[in-house]
Image: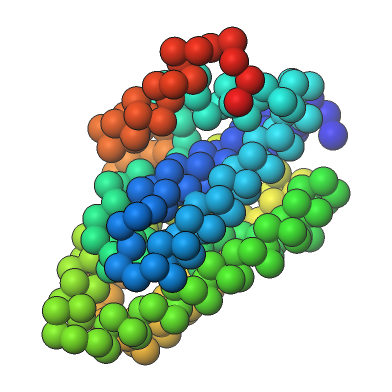
Amino acid sequence: MDSKLNASLAEYLTALGDDELVLAQRDAEWCGHAPILEEDIAFANLAVDELGHARTWYELAAELLSEDRGRFPDHLAYFRDAAEWRCVQLVTLPRGDWAFTLLRRYFFDVLEVLRLEGLKSSGYAPLAEAAAKIYNEELYHVRHGKAWLPRLGRGTEESHARMQAALTQLWPYTAQMFLPLPGEAPLVAAGIAPETAGLEAGWWAAIEAALAAADLRAPEKFIPVTRPRSQQTEHLMGLLSEMQMLARANPQARW
């Protein structure tokens, strides 16, 4: 690939990694707080999975930019300010309750599986290979969330109300997930990545079916997007200040 395409792909991979790493941090906040022991363990594993996926995307970006694969992921995670991150708002939102957490994960994971299906056929072999490996793990994530949705949506009156409230809270943030990722346009043209907007129909079909199975009512389609990935909120700023504190206090350390 030429240098411009390399730069575009590195930008794209960094955005993917940002989504995964921030979601991993939010998942990790459930350690010791999940409603049952099984889910305490499950969410710790989900967080570790997402952390590993973030590292995979960051390391692929490092290869394209001829950076040190050992230091590059740590630089991206610990030494960038919020304005430099390109994650969607959905993953930055505070932990919320159990219903909020499960529904957020399901919204994100369904789209991720669809994107990975496209990336498995990428014209860039290292990306296709990484996507194939991550895909199998993300399938489990989707199944985990899909099992919980009807359990809460059709559970008690309170669990149903909490799920419906979480759906209402999260819905305004879903449209942003279908904006092009940074660097995406030339990658789509070169057969390296799928078009994000083209994944919306498949995502909507899966979500609609899952919500119906859980007796949940989706709002009318999407609310218009008002914030790009480059414009972050105070939620990410707060998370980063906590996540980066130790590394910034010891900038020469290897983590």
For the point 30% across and 68% down, the residue is 35
Q: Nearer the viewer, residue 168 or 156?
A: 156
- Please name the colour scheme applied to the rendered image: rainbow
Give the number of callouts.
Answer: 0
* Quadrant showing the C terminus: top right
Residue shown at 53% from the left, 67% from the top: 141
Along the horizontal axis of the image, is 132 left or right of 26?
right
Q: Is residue 29 visible?
A: yes
| Residue nearer the viewer, 32 or 42 | 32
Q: As displayed, is residue 181 above or below residue 137?
A: above
Reply above or below: 111 against 163: above
Give percent across and percent down for residue 204. 44, 73
Q: Is residue 68 above or below residue 204?
A: above
42 to the left or right of 252:
left
Closest to the observer, 246 or 176: 246
| Residue 4 coordinates in the image, percent (x, y) | 74, 27
**Is residue 16 shown to the viewer in this render?**
no
**Image quarter for residue 183?**
top right
- x, y percent for residue 172: 27, 57
Whole-percent x and y of residue 201?
A: 50, 72
Compared to residue 144, the image places residue 67 above or below, namely above
- Which quarter of the figure has residue 62? top right
Q: Residue at x 78, y 30 (%)?
A: 63
Q: Residue at x 36, y 48 (%)?
A: 29
183 to the left or right of 180 = right
- Location of the N terminus (image quadrant): top right
